[in-house]
Amino acid sequence: MALDHSLVGVASDPVERTWRAGDVIVYALGVGAGAADPTEELAFTTENTAGVELRVLPTFAVLAAQARTGRRLGDFDPARLVHAEQAFELHAPLPVDGRVQVVSTVTGIADKGSGALVSTENTATDAETGKLLVTSRSGVFIRGEGGFGRSGPASDDWRLPERAPDEQVRYRTRPEQALLYRLSGDRNPLHSDPAFAARGGFDRPILHGLCTYGFTGRALLHALCSSDSGGSDPDRFDAMSGRFTKPVLPGQELVVSIWGDGDGAALFRTATDDGTVVIDRGRVRFH
């Protein structure tokens, strides 16, 4: 058996997902919060600082909408799977302590020639109130699983603006960044085991795509969602999407370029300091 195409369009049973303040803090540290100046992001990295309320970084929404459903996509070498794209929409502010019901649906399996793009949509609903909190859409590319002849939808009309970015934010990842980020639950050995990474065609373990995504989300939050009282307001952050194009190695610097695209919207692109684009076709909405 290769990929299980019968999964397309079939929703999983609801799976409960919970998190606590400690999970929120570990995630924030895993995506670099507080590295440059520990006092600047205390609202995301501490729960007991006088006068500072613990808040949740918007990109934690992707983790909140993840859950093990027990369903397998098929039989393939997991070292040949990479995260290809990620989007999420927040329907309500994320609580510091949460309990949700997650439903996952494979929305498509597209033939990309050298491999297959598997697209999934997850919803996270508050377990107490039934209110929808997060819709998360992701795609994974599995090398060697193409050739079945079913293409996916056409790409959107994202275009790189023909002007300099309105703002750029630079963050340097740490050499041990992947080892920090894996504490949030993604224990894929592609990001820690040199032998496993070599099976995937990499010289050494690479950074999680969602870690790069989290660094990028922090940059967008601080650049676009300032609060009247100072700092950044995650409640103003509505949605974010982007396509992973190249891997990042722990220790590399990330440069997030941002272009305003009308009221409450912006385009972005994330690159390493040598100009290699690592997240492309980025969109963000805020209010």
Image: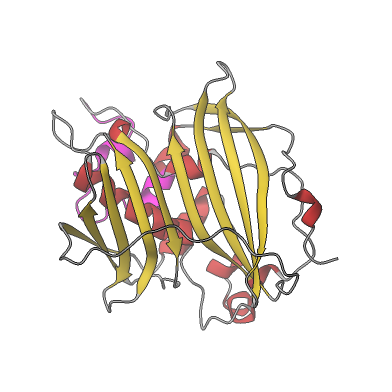
Q: Position of residue 24 (x, y in %)?
A: 43, 39
Given the current orientation, which residue lies at the most extreme right position? 1
Let me know if residue 217 is in the magenta part: no
Let me know if residue 40 is in the magenta part: yes
Characterize the magenta stretch by its predominant secondary structure.
loop
Q: Residue at x 64, y 78 (%)?
A: 114
Does residue 192 appear in the picture of this structure? no
Q: Residue at x 40, y 56 (%)?
A: 213
* Quadrant of image for the C terminus: top left
Does residue 84 appear in the picture of this structure? yes
Residue 221 located left or right of residue 103: left
Given the current orientation, which residue lies at the most extreme top position? 129
Q: Position of residue 172 (x, y in %)?
A: 28, 65
Residue 132 located left or right of residue 15: left
Q: Is residue 189 above or below residue 136?
A: below
Q: Residue at x 53, y 21 (%)?
A: 131
Q: Is residue 13 above or below residue 83?
A: above
Residue 221 located left or right of residue 136: left
Q: Which residues are magenta?
A: 26-50
Question: Is residue 25 or residue 61 the one in the foreground?
Answer: 61
Q: Residue at x 41, y 66 (%)?
A: 176
Q: Position of residue 55 (x, y in %)?
A: 33, 32
Task: State the image quarter where residue 256 is shown.
Answer: bottom left
Residue 88 located left or right of residue 186: left
Task: State the image quarter where residue 200 is shown.
Answer: bottom right
Question: Is residue 265 or residue 221 the one in the foreground?
Answer: 265
Q: Position of residue 252 (x, y in %)?
A: 33, 72
Task: State the image quarter where residue 189 is shown.
Answer: bottom right
